Amino acid sequence: MYFLYSLLLTLGFLILSPRFLFDALRHGKYVAGFRERLGILPFSQNTEPVIWLHCVSVGETQAARPLVQSLKKEFPNHQLVISTITMTGQRLARKTFAGVASRVFYFPFDWGFTVRRTLERVNPRVVVLMETELWPGFMRQCNRRNVPVLLVNGRISERSFRRYRLVKPFFKSVLNTVALAVMQTEEDAERLHSLGMKKKKLSVSGSLKFD
């Protein structure tokens, strides 16, 4: 299933590449951080213990503020690195966490070689994913390196739930790579459980953005 996922990801990239090129030339999208998305990061391998926090875009970055404060307080001897996918999220993360995060960079494309290259350079002790940012290839490579993956402020909409149920066996294998999922509501937790995640790995904490 992972081979099929990688194949579909590659085909989708090739099909959409003309649109990517158009947006890159007209709006500068996807150009920023392209090398980082390929796993070519502008820093040497980390030797200190590292916590990697991943936020997709602006909303997740905003919600991560109290979490970042707590992580820095509880783990003062760890470096904190933050990744985003969108350019707006990258800008906000660099501004918001300046002087707090050791590095802010773009999340890699979800191919095995790009993920392995990034993990080798970042060398995290743990990966924390905001909300429901589940990348099968990335999570599989983390699992192979024995790097725990935590899902925090997790949520799963009814629409996403219906979509995931269509590939439940594959999605269950992805969820098995998650060490702990802290969800926003009981309903979110129950949806993940019905998709195959063990209850002992699930907890509910409310929303980081509002609570």
Image (spheres, rainbow, N blue to C red):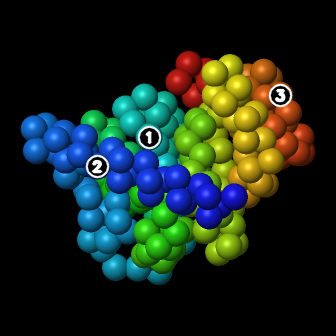
Q: Residue furthest left?
A: 26
Q: Which mark is residue 32?
A: none
Report if residue 28 is visible in the image.
no
Label 1: state its secondary structure.
loop
* Residue 185 coordinates in the image, percent (x, y): 73, 22
- Which quarter shows the N terminus? bottom right
CA gap between label 2 and label 3 equals 37 Å
- The quadrant in which residue 67 appears is top right
First-in-chain label (1 vs 3): 1
Nearer to the camera, 49 or 152 = 152
CA gap between label 2 and label 1 equals 21 Å
Q: Which residue is mark 3?
A: 190
Left or right: 98, with 64 as reference point: left
Q: Residue at x 19, y 39 (%)?
A: 23
First-in-chain label (2 vs 3): 2
Left or right: 180, with 132 as reference point: right
Q: Is 43 drawn above or below residue 153 in the view shown?
A: below
* Disc 1 packing (10 Å; few <14; some 14–19; many ≥20): many
Q: Which residue is mark 1?
A: 56
Q: Is 107 drawn above or below residue 59 in the view shown?
A: below
Q: Residue at x 26, y 58 (%)?
A: 34
Amino acid type at image mark 2: Ser
CA gap between label 1 and label 3 equals 23 Å
Label 2: state its secondary structure.
helix
